[in-house]
Image: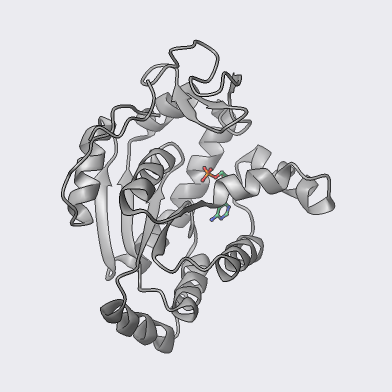
Amino acid sequence: MPLELQTEFRCTEMAMLTANHLSDQSRARVILMLGAPGSGKGTQSSWLSKQFGIPRLSTGEILRTEAKRNTPAGFRLRQILATGALVDDDMVCAVVGARLQREKPENGLILDGFPRTVQQACFLDSLLADLGLPRPTVIDLEISKEGLLRRLAGRRQCAVCGSVYNLISRPSRRGSRCETDGGALVQRDDDTEGVILHRMEEYEAFSAPLIDYYKTANYHRVTADRDVNAIAKDLLSALSMPARFTLSSAA
Ligand code: AMP
């Protein structure tokens, strides 16, 4: 079924003040999607990106693209991604900083998978202030370990366009081919059980302090162990938007 639109690092006080001030002036919005691997960040953030007409930036996607390069950095990234460990903060912050300075998102953006550590969150606060963007609205997708394993083990992605399917909750009508372009549906290298467990451990180790960091921000926890439409509805309500559309499929 296709996605159908029916429907104790603390930032410098200065960065926080500047961003607060700007948020009053600007109509741009920055949305952060937090959540363990497989919690549905990609599906929901892609959909929200269309709803709000603002770009989505997924650090996982950028890093996977970089990892394909035949360079020492590409080789090193391939090794890290294959184990499910987090890529080091300096590298991820450099990638995000360069991208946002180059393609300044005037109307805001949705960040999928960034920040993942408190150090990255600190960096992001300064970057947003630099870019004249407001402080973020934080969405934390919460899901059980069993739910994650079920989703990730069944996840398949089109090798050509990157569309995401799930063998159980969202199979392709064209079997092992993408409904859009007929590309082969493949399993991500880091969606195997051993790597999934390591990615979850990494997430658990770093997420608690990150959530603490954002608890005084515009923070919303949404239960993600549910149908995607129900999750999408809660997201819209958290983001104070009328529910004009529904999602018809899950990944
Ligand atoms: P994702 O597609 O968000 O599940 O990310 C896939 C992998 O990319 C993760 O398991 C990490 O190895 C790496 N990654 C993505 N975003 C970050 C980040 N913000 N910090 C460190 N590593 C990241």
Q: Residue at x 31, y 85 (%)?
A: 21
What residue appears at the point 60 percent right and 68 percent down from the top-left corner?
102
Question: Which residue: 50% across, 44% down?
Answer: 201
Question: Relative to 168, is 62 on the left or the right?
Answer: right
Q: Nearer the viewer, residue 27 or 65?
A: 27
Percent of width and height locating residue 101: 58, 71
The N terminus lies in quadrant: top left
Give the vertical position of 100 relative to 65 (above or below).
below
Quarter holding residue 138: bottom left
Q: Is residue 137 above or below residue 238?
A: below
Q: Residue at x 48, y 41 (%)?
A: 200
Residue 39, position as x, y percentages in the image: 38, 39
Residue 75, quarter of picture: top right
- Given residues 101 and 202, the one toward you in this image is 101
Along the viewing direction, whichever of 207 and 6 lies nearer the viewer: 6
Left or right, 228 with reference to 12: left
**Left of 154 or right of it: where is 78?**
right
Observer-nearest residue: 175 or 166?
Answer: 175
Q: How many marks?
A: 0
Report x, y in % for residue 192: 58, 27
